[in-house]
Amino acid sequence: MRKRKLLAVILSALCVAAAIPSTPAFADGQKVVTLGADLSEEQKQAILRYFGIAGQNIQTLTITNQDERNHLGSYVPLEQIGTRTYSCALVNPTNMGGIQVKTANLTWVTSNMIATTLSTSGVVNCEVLAAAPFEVSGTGALTGILMAYESAVGTQLDATKKEVATQELITTTTIANNIGQAEATDIVNEAKMQVVQGDVVNENDINVIVNDVAEEENIELSAEDRAMLVELMKQISEQKYNYDDMKETLERVEQNMDALMNQPQTTASTAAGTETSAPAPEVPAASAGEQQQTELPEDSILSGTDDSALGSDVVMDATTPEAVESETPQSEMQSETAAGDIEIFNTDEYTDPAASQTTEEPVTENLNAEQTELPAESGETESVPAEGDNMIPETSPEEQSEPQADDSGIDTMMPELGDPMFEVPEEPTTDAPAAPILMSIAAEEMKFAPLYDITTAELLPAGINELTISFQREDILAGTGAITIVNASDGSAIETIQANDTEKVTICPLDAEELTALGWTAGCKASILLENPLAPFSFSYVTMTENAFTSADGTMMTAAIEDSGTWPIQTSGFGFCIDKKNLTVGNTAQGQVMMDGTPVTAAYIENADPAMISFDIGEFTASGSFTATLNAPGKTSFQVSFYDAAGTLLNTIPYTVEIK
């Protein structure tokens, strides 16, 4: 099997001489290694051999999935984090050289993303190895890197800077979905350089910088991506970074991205028998006439890896070319990832596709009998999942099973939209027979709304003040339990509603339009009103106790809904809401328009039927409140449209109220 090696960028000798000393002398830092908690013992040993530290007495931290959620849960979709942690890191603080990174088998984050993100967190000089025994997203490694660095230097990084760094990573990967991985890394890094170097704090100046960088790099940003980038730059500007601390790392990333985007595009050859080729390299391979002028020190952890420890077919990437072996011919290198091809929903989960064939046995680490052997010392045999056992099984479209869910209820293998092999399963059609009376109420049989969709990564409008649960049966009753909206960043309760609170929870049959949308022939819904609307840029999830709902035949939910990935809610920077507690004819209802912290400068309530509902204010130039007068019974719909300063429509939010 061909070994896939992704090579780091080759910098010109002139640029390198100016930016990096030819023989940097690093301090003998306190190395710290982190290991994913869900690795088997054999996989841990393989990682230690890859890091070149097997048998050494080095401080070791175990990174759990809860650690990931604590560090990233406020920003990274919880489906992205998953429920297991496999990726690992080795961190070596240095006294110079900026931030140097090498990765192996990380498919969601790249070496340059890690380097520039770490600079935002407050790290100045450090070497980092991040790896997994098979392809994973790398979220566990990112969490571990920060924890390991703090342990190694004995000092906690500034909490706000770590939050801004995480937001930078999310902004980069979100924008990458639309414009490409290198382009996203480039525009974020370049904008950050200019904001920090110029000590820019004025929002208008930040807008100018973002526009100029996009124009200079010939990158077209959507309104949403541009808003995210401007908001990120505002947060960075507030931290008052010292550019001299970040300069070496940011300029290295800039040179890497420039070299990559200027590289002629090539097409990779695909190994025989492999359905999917290697992820696109973030940085180009060296041509025969190019030679990198810098050398990593002999004791650098980047050059001390045992690349054979992880076997073949390893995806590697580095911020410096010496860190990656040049074994793959240029003709076999894949071109840069096209926009839309970045699988940011790939998680640190690993589930053997064969496990979908049975529900008799619990999900375990290595279920498939066919394994790929890792080279071992002293004749021992290490095993990792064979190629094809990773996130994408080697099956035909006819043989492809639906994603296998682990015992937490989260799909551990997420399909990529647009790929005919991995289409999201369709809902039952309207021709499906009526649902039988069930002996239990399972979360899988409910439909939650609103629900953040990881496959589209589109944030929900702010101002959410009603939750809906649809059941594919008609005999649902309120129980004695509770529904809680939880702040994903710290696990605190935002609001708890008792299911039998008739002022806030109502249960009624689904109407014909709702049934058609769900593809059902019968069912009911529970509407849950919140005391306060969800704020802009909020990250939360909903939990329910198992006695929240029951049924006429006395059955209850099979289990409490506690997993943060079951019903996630992430809001954008603008939105709209109306208080729905007393929508009766002749009354008035208070409402609110939210539009701060975004490029939105105007909002309009449009297409309302004045015979049904009228508003005392119909247009807004800032966040504000309004009063709606309810004139006639029935359902009525209207829209709230949001525009930027140039008059460009950014988003239209449809809204329906039912007046009684």
Image (spheres, helix red, strand yellow):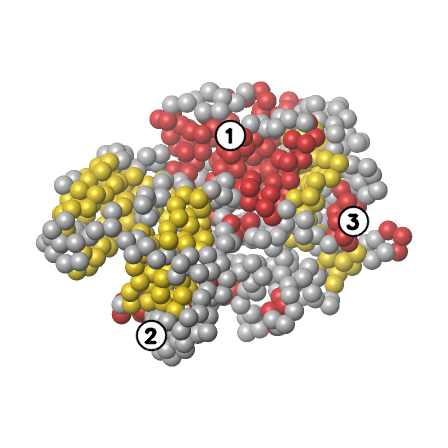
Position in image of residue 332 (x %, y %) = 66, 53
**Mark 1 element type:** helix
Q: Say if 445 sits above or below 570 in the image.
A: below
- Mark 3: few/some/many CA within 10 Å (<14, 14-19, 20+): some
| Distance from the alpha carbon under mark 3 to that under mark 1 | 35 Å
Q: Are marks 2 and 3 in contact (CB under 8 Å)?
A: no
Q: Secondary structure at mark 2?
A: loop
Q: Which residue corresponds to the image point at 34% horizontal and 57% vertical from the top-left?
A: 500
- Observer-nearest residue: 310 or 265? 310
Q: Which residue was labeled with disc 1? A: 160
Q: Are marks 3 and 1 in contact (CB under 8 Å)?
A: no
How far across and how far down the image is residue 423, in percent? 48, 65
Where does the image place residue 230, in percent across and percent down from the top left?
A: 41, 33
In the image: residue 13, left or right of residue 629: right
Residue 496 sits above or below residue 521 on the image:
above
Q: Residue shown at 16%/40% (left/top)? A: 617
Could you say where residue 84 lies in the image, as x and y percent from the top left?
62, 52
